[in-house]
Image: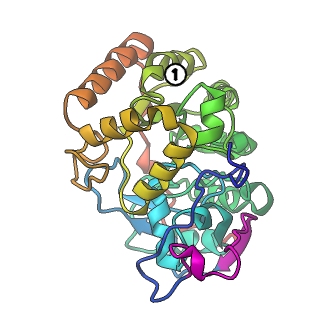
Amino acid sequence: MNENYFKGRGAQIKTSNKFLEAQYVEEHIEGLDEPLLENAATQIFFESPKKIVNKVDSPDLGFVFSMNPYQGCEHGCIYCYARNTHEYFGFSAGLDFESKIIVKQNAPQLLEQQLLNKNWNAVPIMLSGNTDCYQPIERKLEITRRLLKVLVQYRHPVSIISKNSLVTRDIDLLKELASDNLVHVMISITTLDEELRRQLEPRTASAIKRLKTVEALTKANIPVGIMNAPLIPGLNHHEIPSILKAAADHGALTAGMTIVRLNGSIGTIFEDWLRKNFPDRFEKVWNQICSMHGGSVNDSQFGRRMKGDGNFADAIHQLFRSSKKKYFGDRKMPPYDLTKFRKGGMESLF
C-alpha cells in the first residue's frame, strides 16, 4: 500500500468545498514550495444549535424526524451519504468529515424543550439519521446516553441505527424503553469480511462484535434488526445470504438494505479509494454501480436513489428478498406504543 496512505481513515483525499470562496489545492504542484501535508488527527469542535429534532422531508426514508448529536463521524465509512453535509460547516467531505467532529453538547436540553412543546405529538425519532450516535467520542461525552435518559423520562419512542457495539452500554435505558414498546434498534452490517470491513469502515466495530451486539440486545428483550447496507456490486453484494443468516441466528427480528449511491463529493472520494484499494476490479465495480443509477454513480431521484434500477439492481433485490424469507420467516419488529408518551407533564431533568 502507498506509504502516504492514511491508515485508520476511509477517505484519502480532501475534496473541494463548493461553499468556500478560496481554498488550498494541489493541482499545480510546481507552484508549491513544499507539499501540503494533511493532518489526519481527530479534532473536536463544539457548537450550540437552537434545535436538535429535525424534520426529514425525504419520502423514501422510513422516518419523519431525526436528531444527530454529532456532525462528522470518526467511523470513516468511505460511502457515507452524510459526508456532503460537512461542507455546510466549511469542511471537506473527505478527510475532514472523519477527523473534524462537531459536537452538540446541549442536545439533551434541546430534546426536552421539544418534548415539552404543547404542539408536539409522539412520533418515533431516528437517532441518528445522519452520523452514528455511537461513534468513538460518545464513549467519553455520553451525549447519546443523556438523550436516551430524556426519552425514558418522557416515555417517548425512538429508533436507533448504529454500527458500533457501544450501544450495549445503554442496555439499561433501552430495556426501560422496550418494556413499553418504545424502541427499535438497527445494527448496520456491511460485510463479514474483516479485511474489507477495515478498508470500507476503518473505525467501526468488527462484524463479529456487531453480531454479538444483536445477540446481547435480543437477550435483553430489546427489538433489534440489521441493515445490510450499502450493497456494493463486486465488493459485498454476494454476502447477502451469509449476513442475513448470521443476523437471524443471533436473534435479529428484521433486515433492511440499500444500494450504494455516490452523490456529490462522495463520488470523487469513493473513486479515489476504489482505485487505491481495488485497482484490479475498479472498472467492474464502478461500471456496475453506474448501471444501477442510469449510467451515473450520482442519483437523487426519490424512490430510486436508494434502491437502484436495472438488471443488476433487480438481481440484488431478488437475492435479498429470498434470503430474508429463508432466514427471517415471519419475524418482525413489534409496533410502537405511542400512548405511553408523558406529554408536557414532567419536571425538567436539567
Q: Residue at x 76, y 63 (%)?
A: 141
Name the residue furthest top.
Answer: 326
Q: How is the image coloured?
A: rainbow
Q: Position of residue 114 (x, y in %)?
A: 49, 72
Q: Main secondary structure of the magenta part?
A: loop
Q: How many marks?
A: 1
The amino acid type, in three-letter code, at marker 1 is: Ile
Residue 34 is one of the magenta-drawn residues: yes
Picture quarter with the C terminus:
bottom right
Q: Residue at x 42, y 82 (%)?
A: 19
Q: Which residues are magenta?
A: 24-46
Determine which quarter of the picture holds residue 215: top right
Name the residue furthest right.
Answer: 140
Q: Residue at x 75, y 43 (%)?
A: 169
Residue sitting nearer the eye, 71 or 177: 71
Vertical side of 287 occupied by 29: above or below: below
Picture quarter with the N terminus:
top right
Q: Is residue 350 visible?
A: no
Q: Is residue 184 visible?
A: yes
Vertical side of 265 occupied by 277: above or below: above
Q: Residue at x 68, y 78 (%)?
A: 46
Residue position for label 1: 243
192 on left or right of 242: right
